[in-house]
Image (cartoon, helix red, strand yellow):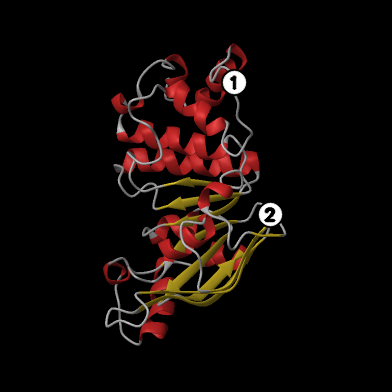
Amino acid sequence: MLELDSVSKTFFAGTVNERLALQAISLRLAPGEFTTVIGSNGAGKSTMLNVVAGKLSPDTGRVVVDGEDVTRLPDHRRAAHVGRVFQDPLAGTAPDMTIEENLAIAYSRGKPRGLRLGVTKAKRDFFRTELASLELGLENRLKMKVGLLSGGQRQALSLLMATFSEPKILLLDEHTAALDPQRAELITRLTTEAVERHHLTTLMVTHNMEQALRVGSRLIMMHEGKVVVDVAGERKQRATVRDLLKAFEQVKGAELDDRTLLQ
């Protein structure tokens, strides 16, 4: 479903600030595979997501989605294929528009547009059904402006907007990091349910190693633009945080604790 083939990306090439963000990275995700991504700051995690989303073009290599080479397609051309939730609950929604208006925009992502009602009765009924799955009572607040929602409510809405149109690829960029533990756990549960319900091929970046081990079917660790650990299935289920730290120590060549890895 998703293939990165020898993808490299360098920022500020030819200057004193040159930084190699991705080093010939190759990664293949099967349809419906849920992969969590960990690594220290500067490891290339967000750069990889931006390349998949079309926000950045790779210097070399290919990005293939469902057999189609999308390497040179800009992000708006990939909108029908890629859903994304950001770390900041304020991102991904229009605060001055109502819940139903935000949902209507997300629902029409990547579809032909013309002069017609943005929110019909049929769509409103559909939105209520989808919102009910969040268990936050938002199905009764369709006319409320999104800017009045709490951070957890907005992130839940962003998750719904990114998934209910059933994109081929779902990108989650530390989407629980800005939430309190209770809300973060709620969004994590809703994420798992949405991925399973829609059978979404998913990349989830997180700095929470326990979460990375608990969620999804596969885990990769990145360092200096490369994938240095890749575990799935029973190996992932048996792995511990200490195992991840040991693996990172072998790459880094120094004894580390979990705080060091998450810097």
**Image mark for residue 31:** 2
Q: Residue at x 64, y 40 (%)?
A: 198
Q: CA distance from mark 2 to mark 1?
A: 26 Å
**SS at badge 2:** loop
Against 17, residue 135 (above or below) is: above
Percent position of residue 209, x then y? 40, 61
Residue 196 in view, yes or no: yes
Q: Quadrant of the C terminus?
A: bottom left
Q: Is residue 18 left or right of residue 100?
A: left
**Image mark for residue 126:** 1
**SS at badge 1:** helix
Q: Quadrant of the N terminus?
A: bottom right
Q: Residue at x 58, y 44 (%)?
A: 195
Amino acid carrying mark 2 in the image: Pro
**Image mark for residue 221:** none
Q: Residue at x 58, y 21 (%)?
A: 115
Q: Residue at x 36, y 41 (%)?
A: 91
